[in-house]
Image (cartoon, rainbow, N blue to C red):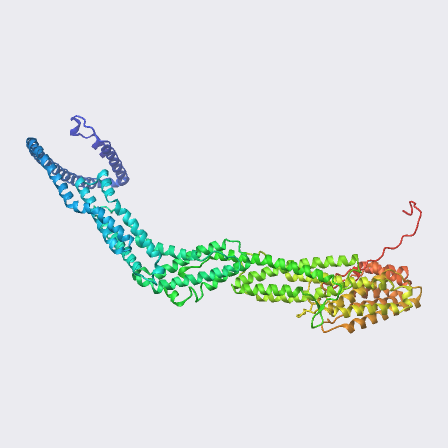
Amino acid sequence: MSTGEEENSGGNPGDALPKVEVWPELERAERFARGAALKWASGVFCRPEQLERLGQYRKRESQRTSSIHSRLKSVVQSYLEGVGWGLEQLREARVELREVSRSLEEARAESQRNAGGVSTLDTLRETAENYRQLLAAVSNLPRLYSVPGMVLETERLVESRRLLEAHERLMELEQWQDEVLWQIREAGGTAIAPQDETLVRGYFSGVGRLVEALGRELWSVVSSGLVLAGQNPTPFVSAVRIVEREEALDQALLEERAAGSPRPLPPGRPRGWRDRFFQVMEEVACARVRSVSYRHTRGPGLASHLAALQHGIMGDINTVRHLLEHCVPPHYHLARAYLQACHRCLQAHLSQVCSWDLESGEIFTVLNWVLHVYNSSDMMGDAELVSVIGSEELGPLISQEGLDHLQNKYVHSVQNSVSEWMQKALEVELTDWHRDQEPDIDHQGFYHTSLPTIITQMLEENARVALMISDSLRNQTIQMGLYEMESFLNRFRDALVEFGKEHRRDRSSNKFYLHYLLAAISNCIVLKTSIESLQQQQSSCPVGRFFRTPPGPLTALHRAVKKACRLVVDELKQELQPVLLRLLSRAWLSNEEVTQTLCGMLEQHCDLYARARPPWNQVSAPVHPLSRTVTAYSHIIYLAPLCQQRLQDECEWMVVVEYVRELMQKKLVCRGAEERSQLAQHIAQDAQQLMELFQGMEGEGAVAGVTPTALLPVLADFIRLKDPNMLTLEVSGLVAKYPDISEEHVSVLLDVRGDVPREVRGAVLDMLEQSSPPLPSEYRPVFSEILVPLPSMPFCLPSAKCA
């Protein structure tokens, strides 16, 4: 610290001098330096023993300071030398500027002295300009005088179709016009005066008319090229040469302009007559398409119209390829251009045709022509035409979206027709049902009507016709047919329901009611075969979005057959009702004719069921051990119930149910053991007769298992049992075989026996209440269809106790 104090308090020569302003940056730097020095000194001399080296540090820092001062002096010296050199250069520049200013003053004075002599040259300049204009006018006068005559002569050449000569004169007139305009522009400077340009254009106005007249003749010749090709192609060749001249001139002018020429493009340039040539050829192609008569294009006339289009287009294409293409330069590719033009014209024409309200036959004609005829070897699929331009370059005549729309429109039209025909066929079928004669019998002996033949042929024909277009359309048509079949079968079922209602209202109105029900079942078998055939014809191609949900004709078919079978069984039940009412009465107990009459009527009906056509592919349904079949009325529907055997099974089931229902009426209550034995024996005899009857009528389609008639011997054994105490065991076996039997049914059976004590009855009913086994999934209930009559209430006076 003493050293710092000595430095701060030491004498300084600058203290006696006037105070000089110090820069803030310098002052800040000095403070930072002092602070850094203090920090360094405090770190070095922090211990007393380090003060011994103070002299060494002072000497080293003095040397460093001297080195810094010498470097600073050298830098300042070099800076001062540079400043001196710069000042010397500025002094020299000032001297030179004074000399230049003096020279400029002298030149200005000399220019002012010569200004008077220059004004005398203006007259000479104007005279020279006038002379140049007069020279140009004199040189152009012969041409200008000959312009009207050349215009008239060129017009005569155009009218006489001497096109090449007319075009040469026209090019000469256009050259004169361009030169006159350019000379006027050069004389007038960068721009031509509007009045001068108007004057020149007015004088050469005939040139513009000649261009238009020559253009009209050219395009007239080009549009007649297909006709001239076979007669005299010279005018067409001349027209092409003129087009090429004009194209070359346009190209040269454009290149000259692109190269930076100040000369502007002549009026009307570039003409683009080559593009106009191809445009006219496309107009010719469209005119040839339009020339085909639009009359009688609806219905059958549409096919003739498309055939005429094919003939006309192919004739024109052959003319272009073999004749006209040799009259144009090779780079024109005229055949290719004409093919593309025809394709575009056909696209527009077919788009217009598709917008009409077409029927299904017309849509088929358009689709067949677009997808098959147009791409065949007779048209664009020809090998020589494919070498000119491929079908992928031409693209489709109708877009995929348009084809889908047209196919959907076709399917809608066919759907309306199919729906109408199915409705008519159903009306004819309903008329046949009311005929006073038996249905027709085919060569196999089965009842049938004309309904399945009409519908099958109609659907098969529609699928065959659609296949001529594409697999996708065939699939759509088949699916549409399946939808319509489903709708038709629903209406067919409704007709069966109404047919059954009419018969119940007046049973004498139609004596062949049952026969036509069997014919309806046979017809459904044939329709099922047709449905399966249509489903097999469908390929894996997608059918599009025309239909949202898959059709279910087989489900509708099963529902219709289910209703027909139900009506058949109801009719049998109605006829058997008088006989069934006589069963299990005291009169029946001593008379066997009732059962014989019942068996005779059943045999007659089952023989009639043989007239129903069996299915071609019978399906065996899962069978419960206690049930011989799962019928069309069960939860799972199989086709097997649609045959004679299944109808016989339904009859057997119905007879057993009605037999047990008569037993539940308690028309016969046993009065003793002898009567119980007689009742059981009679029930067993009836069961044996019914078993022999139905087993004798079973065919190849019979399903092995326990028959419904097996219930009757079980009931007979229940009644025949001598020891009432064994009834609990007997009832448990009955419940095991027929789990749908209820307490009411068992109670009636106990009443029919007439000898069951109250204790046994209570034990049996308690056992039933405790054991309620679930019904197997494939079990067909028997007792669930039999209602037990309510017990009759004894007569009593209205009293509180009785109430």
Q: Is residue 365 left or right of residue 159?
A: right
Query: At which x and y percent is residue 410?
Result: 54, 58
- Relative height, residue 187 to residue 12 (above, below): below
Q: Nearer the viewer, residue 745 or 411?
A: 411
Res 162 visible: yes
In the rendered image, which quarter is residue 718 located in?
bottom right
Give me the residue at 50% from left, 53% from top: 355
Query: At which x and y percent is residue 715?
Result: 84, 66
Q: Nearer the viewer, residue 655 or 307?
A: 307
Query: At which x and y percent is residue 733?
Result: 81, 66
Query: At which x and y percent is residue 429?
Result: 69, 61
Res 775 visible: no
- Relative height, residue 234 to residue 682 (above, below): above
In the rendered image, which quarter is residue 79 located in?
top left
Q: Is residue 176 left or right of residue 492?
A: left
In the rendered image, which quarter is residue 274 located in?
bottom left
Q: Is residue 284 left or right of residue 124?
A: right
